[in-house]
Amino acid sequence: MPLPEAAPFFRQDPPVEAAAIQQLHKPFEIAPRSLNEVLALHPDQAARCDAARLNLLCATGLPGAQDLHVDALLHRLDVWSAWIATQTQANFHHFHCDPKAYDNSEPYWRCLTLSTVLQLHLGVRYEPRLMSGDAWDWRNSGDVLLHGVLGSRRTGSCPSLPVLLIAIGRRLGYPLRQVHAPAHAFARWDSADHESPAWRTQINLECHGHGLASHPDDHYHAWPVPWTPAMHDSEVRRARPQYLRSLEPAEELASFLLQRVYVLLAHGRGLEAVPAAQAALKLAPDSPAGFAALDQALGQTNRRHARRAQTPPATPPNHTSAPSTSGPHPVSFKPARGLPPWS
């Protein structure tokens, strides 16, 4: 559905008071300042960190992140979160007046408001270049890590947009988690034991198109990659499923590190990718993606050294081999629920 023309759009950050930012929910006990500090984190420490900070630091030194200013981008994230909080409070009467329009679900309404304000007021959208069925391109870190959507482009993709939703939601006190499906990632409201009975629910959340989509888990058995019988059998045999479960904070960080690995591999920088792949495996030791990423990083490094040994010095080696890991599937813009009428 078309975006309402009356919605305010801020080319700069929206006006919020410092007091509104101070009221955000930010119980972060550990604040790494460098990529090396992120690589040294233990699994139990990841839960005490801001997922947005971790994601941004994983972009350190990558192509497309040369002018990375983590503190400035985190401040922007706080400003956006505070603005969304004010808009949520100002429009909460719409839910009370007609809860059936939102499946009698306050969590769904809150996430719909979050997604709507991101899209209409702040201009966040899916990166247009990645909407076609062409091969995925890992070379631009801004497409897959958070600095792209928090930067001037305000665009992201399925690796980064759920992280934005989660980072803002957690600042608002929402119990949001990241979930993986084959070649896809999304967010989930997951709180079966919340102190508020109205918040005790589980809702899958997609904010890649207009409005907000919420699909049951079965949806991801057919999209974006149809599950084969072998995939079903493999998931059943696993002590801990790889897909369609809410990730632990350490696993979320591992996924950020793997995005870093894939970008480096796309630029032929396998040796630099090895520490991130090793750290990802330390955080998520049962992750097949982590083992595959490390294998690719080591393989690219060994091939590079072999070429150097065999190639005369006057001929520079070719360092352009790309990772074999396929990228996220192009997003289908058919949300289950469009923008709310009050937006």
Image: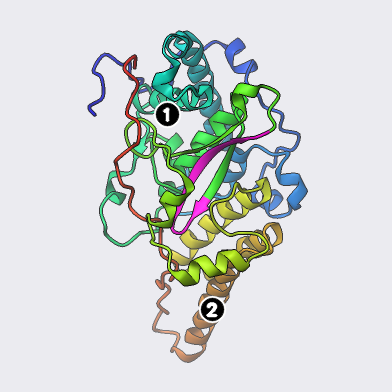
**Pointer 1 residue:** 115
Q: Quadrant of the C terminus?
A: top left
Q: Which is more toward the observer, 31 or 284?
A: 284
Q: Which is more toward the observer, 303 or 189?
A: 189
In magenta segment, residue 181 = yes
Upstream in sequence: badge 2 or badge 1: 1
Disc 2 crowd rating (10 Å Cα; few below 14, some 14-19, many 20+) is some
SS label for mark 1: helix
Residue 251 versus residue 85 in the image, above or below: below
Among the 4 quarters of the image, the one containing residue 242? bottom right
Q: Position of residue 93 (x, y in %)?
A: 46, 8
Q: Give the magenta range.
A: 180-192
> Which label sits on residue 299?
2
- Looking at the image, which residue is at 45% across and 85% down? 313
SS label for mark 2: helix
On the question of residue 68 being in view, the answer is no
